[in-house]
Amino acid sequence: MNSFYQEIPNPWFTMWRHPRETVRMYLQAGSGKWLWILAILAGIKLFLDNADAQNVGDRIAFGNIILLSLVFGPLVGIFYWYLFSGLFTLTGQILGLSGRWSDMRRAVGLSFVPLASLMPFWVIKLVLFGSEVFTPWTPVLDSSLWLLLLIVLFYLVDLVIGGWYLVTLSRSVAEVYECSAWLAFALILLSSVVFSVVLSFVLLFFV
C-alpha cells in the first residue's frame, strides 16, 4: 500500500477500487493528467448512448452518426465535466461544505474512468452490429441467437459499469468535501434535480 502513495497512480486502474485515494493524490499533486482524455472518451460514449436510445439511425446515416459522435462527443464530455463540476461545487457551498471548483473538476474528471473504459465495447458493437445499433429494425440481430445474446450481454455490462460510475463519482466528490459517500451521492442527486428543473424552465421559452 505504501507504493500507492509514492507517486501519482494511474487512474485507469486505481479509480475502480481506490477512487478516494486516487483523487486525494491528484489533489495533493495538482495534477491534471488524463482528465481531458477521460472527459472526451466519456463524451463520445454518452453521445453514442443517446443516439442508440433515440434510434437516430432512422433519420441519420450510420457513417454520419459516427462522424457526429467524434465531432460533438468530445464537446458533450467537456461540457458535462465543467457543468457538473460547477453544480456540485455550488450545491456543496449552499449546504455549507468546503471545496474548490478546481478540485471538483479533477474529481469529476477522474470519475469518468468507468465510462471511458466502455468505449472498446462500443467499438466492438459498431463492428459487429453496424447500423442496427441505432435503429429499432434489427433483421440481422433477430436472425442470430448468438448475436442477440451478445448484445444483451453488452447492455448488461454497460448497466453494471454505469452503476459503478455513480459509486465512483460519489466517492470522488466525497473526497473533495471530506464527507461520506452517501452525503456526496445525495448532493449529486440534488444537483441533478436542480439542473433538470432549471433546464425545463429554460426550454419553455424555446419550445
Image (cartoon, helix red, strand yellow):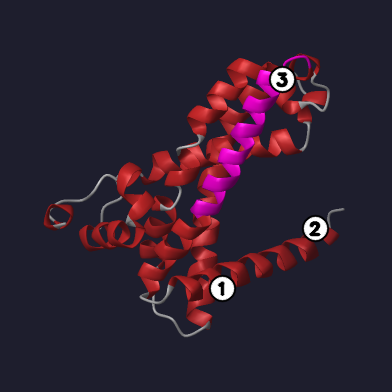
Disc sitting over residue 186 in the figure = 1
Of discs 3 and 1, which sits in the foreground?
3
Disc sitting over residue 145 in the figure = 3
> Residue 144: x, y in percent?
72, 15
Is 172 drawn above or below residue 39 in the view shown? below
* Region of the chain picked out in magenta, as a range: 143-165
Task: Judge left or right: residue 129 versus residue 16.
Answer: right
Element type where label 1 sits in the image: helix
Element type where label 3 sits in the image: helix
Q: Work out how far the residue at label 3 is from the one at label 1, CA to CA, in angstroms.
A: 41 Å
Q: Work out how far the residue at label 3 is from the one at label 2, CA to CA, in angstroms.
A: 43 Å
* Mark 1 / mark 2, whichever is N-terminal: 1
> Residue 66: x, y in percent?
62, 23
* Mark 3 / mark 1, whichever is N-terminal: 3
> Residue 97: x, y in percent?
43, 81
Residue appearing at x 45%, y 70% in the figure? 181
Residue under label 2 = 203
Membership of 182 in magenta stretch: no
- Circle 1 packing at 10 Å, graded few (<14), some (14-19), many (20+), is few
Is residue 59 in sight in this rendering?
A: no
* Mark 3 / mark 2, whichever is N-terminal: 3
Three-letter amino acid code of the residue under disc 2: Leu
Task: Judge left or right: residue 89 versus residue 175.
Answer: right
Is 2 drawn above or below residue 55 in the view shown? below
Looking at the picture, tell me which residue is in the foreground, 138 or 106: 138
Three-letter amino acid code of the residue under disc 3: Leu
Q: Residue furthest right?
A: 207
